[in-house]
Image (tube, grey):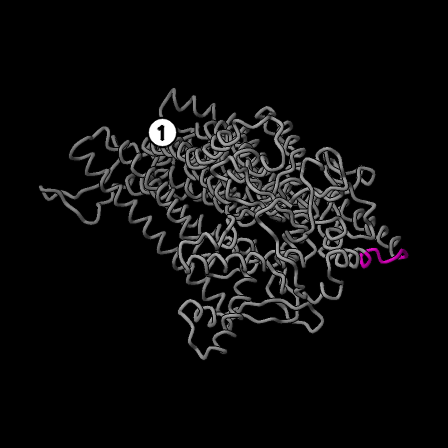
Amino acid sequence: MSTVPVAPSQDDADNGNSSQLPPDIVLVVTRLDPEAAKDDKERREMEQTRAERQELYTKLRNLGLELTVRKGDASSDTFKDKTFILISARDDVLDSTASSFAIEKRLKEEHKDPNVPEEDFTGYAEYSTQTRHLFAEGFDGFFTSLERQRLIFTMLERHGPNHVDLDRVVKDDVIDDYFPMPSAKFADLLEDTWLNAPVWQRAPIHKIRDYFGEKVAFYFAWMHIYTIWLGILAVISVGFGIYQAATSVDNLAVGIYAAILAVWCTAFSEAWKRRQNVLAFLWNVQDFEEEEPPRPEFIQKFVGSKRAAKAKEESGDSLSGKFKRHAKLARLFDEKRGVWSTRGFVETQDGDEHIVFTRAEYIKRTVIGFIGTLLMVVAAVVGTLGIMAAKVFISREHYPRAGPFIGALMNAVFISLMNIFWSFVAVRLNEWETHRTDTQFEDALIFKTFAFQFVNSYVSLFYIAFVQASRIQLFGLTDADGEPIRDQCATDNCLNALFVQLLIILTLKQLVRFALALVPALFGRLKQCYTTRDKPLSRGLRERIQAQAILPTFKGTLSEFSEMAIQYGYLTLFGVAFPWGALVCFAINLVERKADAAKVLKLTRRPRYRGAEDIGTWQAIIEFIGNAAVVTNALVLYFTSPVSTEYLRARFGSEANAFFFLIVCEHVIFAVKLTVAYLTPDVPFWVEAAKTRYTVFIHNKRAEAEGTADLRANYVAEAFAAGGGNDEEARAGAVTPRPELDESQDS
């Protein structure tokens, strides 16, 4: 067996042996034996895959990473033919990379700003080797488990000859899978302080950030603020719900509740913006999007297109269709010197070299993506109208009383099925659009997802509130007697129909969501328990790796945010019809917070690091819904609430005057919302003051370090000398030949 850098097991690190390297990322491969191939074709495929794997291992070791081989459990049917390649990195390699990319790292307790009113927090700053002494150590080394994984992925995915996109490697069947390894100590700490804590207790958001990264932490921070404000609204809405039960769904109090709901939306939005800006400052990620590196998929498209174009030139245009398409894509990419700003790429002679995708082509693809989204929105509207027509037919011809309930049930199922279908199509469309960064990719995906789900989820409610309530003739149709067919609510009470629709949709959608999200995760957990049922309680490294490998992958926070945004819309856009919705959603979200915590911590694999400076497009969506709610609730009072309409007509003498009064009230409410937003600073004063103190502190500490030796250069030189290369080779991205890695034996 060839000699390779060896990283000892996690057991050694857990036992306090700080000289050992814990595994950070695990590659899963199936052992291949070309001699056992059934025919020449299979043997050639195996040899090709083995060659591609060795090329991958060579790139990893050229980057200064340590590789360790662990065979799967021979007694397990699932893992007996599997091999795990454990990726680790020495502290000097991590230090040089962390300093080069200036990642955020937690400061020591002694450097905490006493004027920052935040518990369980010291502060973060951009790391440099010169100021290493300012930063706190992690559980199993100077760099935390999350920081090590982040740095390794950064090394893999930066542009150069040793660039590695592990997702592409999996897609090309070179390896079976990969996943970040959890930190046993940190995971146990989160389980005690978060998962096992009471449902009303605030999540340890800074610990969540230190283990999962900012994107996941921002979701749970938003969820906490949202649930608190839901609780406030639930207390208010109980009184209106009791009054509604004592009188009827349609009563004069709905107008008061609509005004309260509008102000509540603004208060919640402003409270979150303040908290979001506080966290962005505390985690030192206010400029994350300006410094965000390109997606590995973006780099892979560039590299693949240039390679295909070169092959086309050498072969004289005798390539297959797939390679021809890649070759054509090459003319849309370029490498230019400059900087990325919030408005796009700016060319400068002194800037670094960046991969740039043609702006005109990017705009064209974005427009096509918008058109595709619009077509799906139209399909959702047509489908919903079909369901409404079926409901009318069932109510008129067969089941007058049960018709509305059957229609609501059909609509809830249709909504769920269309959302599942579009979630698959939207991702494929988004990938084709070629977004440069993860933030751009996710913002575009959020728009596609929510634009479709907004129509798919709410069109039935708009139909009941404004079409049925107005008793409009359906498509010019008439019955056998020549009378126009009009879809109208039972007993002409459309506010009651909205109440029924919201009650069914909110409860059924939540059950479907729990089933889709938790059942596969629970199945994976049960399978994990079954696989390891005969193992001792104190499991070793191999067992822990296999326990992770069998779990499903965490898909990110997009689906969670999407469901919460849709719930927020149900709660606000038509909240006057269902005041109890606030209490229902509050109870659901208390459970949801724990379910999401269990999913990300126990029921799925640990996700890889994803950074963020805010919740992205979701903030604009929340504000859009809050403003739209003012309009929809005012229109519901006029079109859907006969009690309110009759009262206003009697009060002001005519329908026109009544409608004018509602328009005036709507504008007054908008003025109140704007006033609340204006009087609530998005950034607290203490944050502005702390920013100044932080800037001075870091400047002084770096100035003190300027007189010392260039530690970073020493770390870089030592790292690549130990890895068989040198600093100049590393900067040039040279590919150094390496001995083969033997997958058939533990190293």
Q: Position of residue 135 (x, y in %)?
A: 79, 44
Q: Position of residue 394 (x, y in %)?
A: 20, 35
User: Front-most of 343 and 64?
Assistant: 64
Helix, strand or loop at label 1? It is loop
Q: Quadrant of residue 199?
A: top right
Question: Residue at 25% of width from left, 30% of height from top?
Answer: 491
Q: Quadrant of residue 300?
A: bottom right
The image shows a total of numbered marks equal to 1
Placement of 228 over or under 738, stated as above or below: above
In this view, which residue lies farthest toward the right?
Answer: 707
Q: Position of residue 713 (x, y in %)?
A: 81, 59
Q: Would residue 269 be counted in the magenta stretch?
A: no
User: Front-most of 706 and 713?
Assistant: 713
Q: Is residue 392 visible?
A: yes
Q: Is residue 458 left or right of residue 696?
A: left
In this view, which residue lies farthest toward the left?
Answer: 481
User: Front-most of 522 and 238?
Assistant: 522
Q: Which residue bears the numbered disc 1?
A: 250
Q: Is residue 569 left or right of residue 250?
A: right
Q: Which residues, given as a range, are shown in magenta?
A: 707-714
In this view, which residue lies farthest toward the bottom?
Answer: 316
Residue type at tag 1: Asp
Q: Quadrant of residue 506?
A: top left
Placement of 72 over or under 151, stated as above or below: above
Q: Mark 1: give few (<14), some (14-19) or many (20+) Cα within 10 Å.
A: many
Q: Position of residue 667 (x, y in %)?
A: 48, 45
Question: Residue at 70% of width from left, 42% of height from top?
Answer: 144
Q: Is residue 711 left or right of residue 670?
A: right
Placement of 357 over or under 89, stated as above or below: below
User: Front-most of 576 and 139?
Assistant: 139
